[in-house]
Structure formats: structure tokens, C-alpha cells
Image: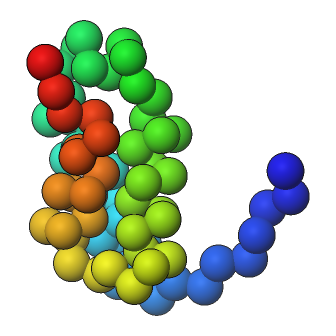
Amino acid sequence: MAAEARDFSSETVRNMQVALDLAWRSLSPEQQARSSKMEVATRILDAAEAGERSPARLLMLALLPASGP
């Protein structure tokens, strides 16, 4: 798969990084074992590409699919 050029402001990149770090740390070891950090990052990237810029919303959207029993 070829890398796509993505153009985000430095603030958006910071927000995505914060969301990724918080999302990953908030997952239990069991959830981390069933997921990957790349999957969480991809959800954040997809949300940012769709126009989401709020760190809190990026975090929430990153965790939605990873949440569960």
C-alpha cells in the first residue's frame, strides 16, 4: 500500500498524538492484546481526515471500537 500525502496542522498532529497516547493507556492489557496501537491510530487518523479536530472527540472515537467486555 502506497503512503498517501496528508496535510495536517501541527496543532492537529499534536491533538492526534495526545488522543493516541491517552487511548492506548486507557485500554486494559486484555484490550491491548486484542487490538493494536496501529488500529487505534488508524481510527484517529480517519476521524481527523473526516474533519474532527477536538482531542476529546478524537479520543472518544478511537476508543469506541476498542471498548467492550
Q: Is residue 4 left or right of residue 53?
A: right
Residue in front for this viewpoint, 1 or 16 = 1
Q: Which quadrant holds residue 2? A: bottom right
Residue 44 location (% of width, % of height): 39, 59
User: Who is closer to the viewer here, 35 or 10?
Assistant: 35
Query: For the point 28% across and 35% down, which residue is it?
Result: 66
Residue, far right: 2
Counting from the top left corner in percent of width and height, residue 28 is at: 17, 20
Residue 3 image position (x, y, % from top left): 79, 62
Q: Quadrant of the C terminus?
A: top left
* Residue sitting at x 32%, y 21%: 32
Q: Is residue 10 above or below residue 67?
A: below
The color scheme shown is rainbow
Asked whether the viewer can see residue 10, the reply is: no
- Asked if one can make out residue 22 in the rendered structure from this viewpoint, the answer is yes
Above or below, 17 against 64 in this view is below
Whole-percent x and y of residue 12? 38, 80
Residue 6 drawn above or below residue 26: below
Residue at 18% across, 56% down: 60
Residue 54 in the figure: left or right of residue 20: left
Q: Is residue 28 above or below residue 62?
A: above
